[in-house]
Image (spheres, rainbow, N blue to C red):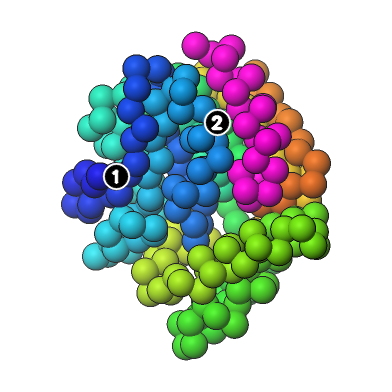
Amino acid sequence: MATMAVNGIELYYEDSGGSGPAIVFAHGLLWSGRMYDAQVAALRGRYRCITYDHRGQGESASSPTAYDMEMLADDAAALIEGLGVAPCHFVGLSMGGFVGLRLASRRPQLLRSLTLMASSADTEPLLNLPKYGVMALIARRVGLGPLVTPVLRIMFGRAALRDPARAAERAVWANELRALAFPRVERALDSVVGRRAVFDELGRIRTPTLILHGEDDHAIVPARARRTAAAIPGARLIMLPRAGHTPTREEPAAVNRELAQFLETQT
């Protein structure tokens, strides 16, 4: 557990150490590096596993100014360089995937491989903007409490939300959302909703790329992942049954298996 001064902000990260190739994990909106606990536990014996929290989220410091996805990509690049782990394997989920795409197209020397989960290269669909605008208005006025149930339905697929045996897990996810201070994450939401597309950059990516996507992802529907995969030379797309927008927590065994198999071919 440590912090690093990156582009004027203190970023929190956790580093398993070890002499194996480094994997840097970038989390999705509203969560933190803890969403990769199951992956770190499975891989830390063979790899140096590094999770970090984006500015304004998790344990990282709040940003004093607004920021965009380009700044978050700059943060990730500075962290990788500061830790001296380039070229690393980069694993990004949703928001973390937006960052990973920018690194692979603009800073390829930093990456050994790229894994995208629940992510895409496009802008936020126009039909989603009013929904997120209303949710932000509610959160600004009364906090995230009333929004926990609808946010869970966005973040998780039906299998994870309906399984009686997973009630305790759902309670943990819900409590993490309730504990969020919305003023801290509002700028992160703005960076996601306002991101620009990077489809025009994908053709120049030569970093080996794996794309894992939940078949029941409602936040980024599978068709968007397929378009992204088709635009990256040599990218491999694997659809995950029973998973929604948070596969690292919904189907950790499947993610661990596919990720381990992919990484073994890149080292």
**Is residue 204 at all visible to an observer of this figure?**
no
**Is residue 31 at all visible to an observer of this figure?**
yes
Q: Residue at x 59, y 82 (%)?
A: 146
Image quadrant where residue 119 sits: top right
Q: CA distance from mark 1 to mark 2?
A: 19 Å
| Residue that numbered label 2 is attached to | 42
- Percent of width and height locating residue 208: 56, 19
Question: Does the stretch in magenta take in 249?
Answer: yes
Question: Does the stretch in magenta take in 228?
Answer: no
Q: Residue at x 41, y 18 (%)?
A: 21
Q: Which mark is residue 223?
A: none
Secondary structure of the residue carrying numbered label 2: helix
Mark 1 and 2 residues: CB-CB less than 8 Å, in contact?
Answer: no
Q: Which mark is residue 1?
A: 1
Q: Classify residue 93 as left or right of residue 70.
A: right
Q: Which mark is first along the chain, 2 or 1? A: 1
Mark 2, residues whose alpha carbon is within 10 Å: few (<14), some, or many (≥20)? some
Could you tell me which quadrant the N terminus lies in?
A: top left
Secondary structure of the residue carrying numbered label 1: loop
- Percent of width and height locating residue 136: 52, 76
Mark 1, residues whose alpha carbon is within 10 Å: few (<14), some, or many (≥20)? few
Q: Residue at x 42, y 66 (%)?
A: 185
- Percent of width and height locating residue 261: 64, 19
Question: What range of the chain is rendered magenta?
Answer: 246-267
Mark 2 belongs to which amino acid?
Answer: Ala
- Percent of width and height locating residue 126: 65, 63
Q: Main secondary structure of the magenta part?
A: helix
Residue nearest the viewer, comparing 222 with 30:
30
Mark 1 belongs to which amino acid?
Answer: Met
